[in-house]
Image (cartoon, rainbow, N blue to C red):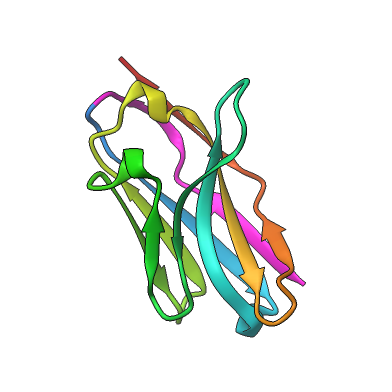
Amino acid sequence: QVQLVESGGGLVQAGGSLRLSCAASGSVFSIDDMGWYRQAPGKQRELVAVISRGGTTNYLDSVKGRFTVSRDSAKNTVYLQMNSLKPEDTAVYYCRSSIQFTGRIYWGQGTQVTVSS
C-alpha cells in the first residue's frame, strides 16, 4: 500500500507561480513512476507531468517550458513547479504513483489550483 498526500495548491493570479508537493508513505520502495494529473470541471482527467524512477520526464504539451516535475527519492516526494500560470491551468491536481512489476496505481486526494485572470 502507498499513501499520497498533496499540498501547495491555492489561488494565484495569471502569470504567477505555485509549487505542488506530493509525499508518499507506505511501501515506497516499490514505487516506479510518479506524476501529476489534473481535472477541470466538465473535462476528463489529463496527464500533466510524469517522472520515472530513473528521472525521465514527460509533459503535457501545453505546460512545456512552464512546469517542471522533480523527485526527491530520499524524501519520497514529487514536486510540480508551475510558473507563468494561466487561467486554463485551473483544475484539481492529483498526484499519482505506479508500482513496479504490478502496475498498480495509487492516487492522492487532489489539491485545487485556481488561476485568476
Residue at 34% from the left image edge and 43% from the top image edge: 61
Q: Which contiguous range is marked in magenta?
A: 1-14
Lateral position of residue 26 relative to residue 8, left or right: right
Tell me the quadrant of the picture where the C terminus can be found: top left
Q: Which is the main secondary structure of the residues drawn in magenta? A: strand
Q: Position of residue 38 (x, y in %)?
A: 53, 39
Lateral position of residue 46 relative to residue 48, left or right: right
Lateral position of residue 9 relative to residue 103, left or right: left
Most foreground residue, 64 or 112? 64
Q: Position of residue 70 (x, y in %)?
A: 36, 65
Q: Is residue 3 magenta?
A: yes
Residue at the front extreme, as displayed: 61
Residue at 65% from the left image edge and 80% from the top image edge: 100
Q: Position of residue 68 (x, y in %)?
A: 31, 55
Q: Position of residue 80 (x, y in %)?
A: 39, 53
Q: Quadrant of residue 102?
A: bottom right
Tell me the quadrant of the picture where the N terminus can be found: bottom right
